[in-house]
Image (cartoon, rainbow, N blue to C red):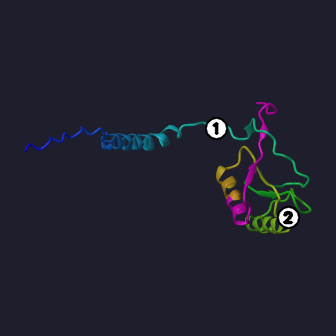
Amino acid sequence: MARPRIRKRPMAEINVVPYIDVMLVLLVIFMITAPLLTQGVKVELPRADAAPVENENEEPLIVTIDAAGNYHLNIGDDNRKGVEAEVLKKRVSIVLRRKPGTQVLVRGDKDVNYGKVITAMALLKQAGVESVGLVTEPADKVTR
């Protein structure tokens, strides 16, 4: 008695291992080249074509950093007088405890060291500020 021959069907699968290898190589290439592309960008900071922040009924808390790197706060009797970093942090945390939804904005002079602005933002974060807005001069009002 002859046995019926069972014919095997050809497999229709794609081997994806080479494609994964190619994708990993491309990923490494993009990870290496992406930081190199953004190093030489020139930025002029205080000008921006940004939409104005929606003005709520309460006055925002504004931290100003002058050209000398001194911090100023728009609360208190004399806001032209600079405040120390720890005093700034303490006053902001007190305001946020009294009014939790207070909007906080940072105004930095265009000639101030960028590190002073970052330090101010870190102090605000330590004081409990969730998000910080940056105040800029509209580009159409700036003259050269």
One can see residue 94 in this view: yes
Q: Is residue 7 above or below residue 74?
A: above
**Looking at the image, is mark 2 or mark 1 nearer the viewer?**
2
| Residue 11: x %, y % from top left | 26, 40
Considering depth in this image, is 91 or 144 the residue closer to the camera? 91
Q: Are marks 2 and 1 in contact (CB under 8 Å)?
A: no
Q: CA distance from mark 2 to mark 1?
A: 35 Å
Type of amino acid at the residue the image marks with label 1: Val
- Callout 2: SS: loop
Q: Residue at horizontal 69%, vertical 65%?
A: 126
Magenta region, residue range:
122-144
| Residue 119: x %, y % from top left | 67, 58
Q: Is residue 63 above or below residue 144?
A: below
Determine which residue is flagged by label 1.
43
Q: Earlier in the sequence, mark 2 or mark 1?
A: 1
Determine which residue is flagged by label 2.
99
Other-residue count near label 2 (Cα within 10 Å), few / some / many at <14 / 14–19 / ≥20: few
- Callout 1: SS: loop
Q: Residue at horizontal 73%, vertical 66%?
A: 127
Q: Left or right? Give the position of 42 relative to 14.
A: right
143 magenta-colored: yes
Considering depth in this image, is 139 or 131 the residue closer to the camera? 131
Q: Residue at horizontal 44%, vertical 44%?
A: 31
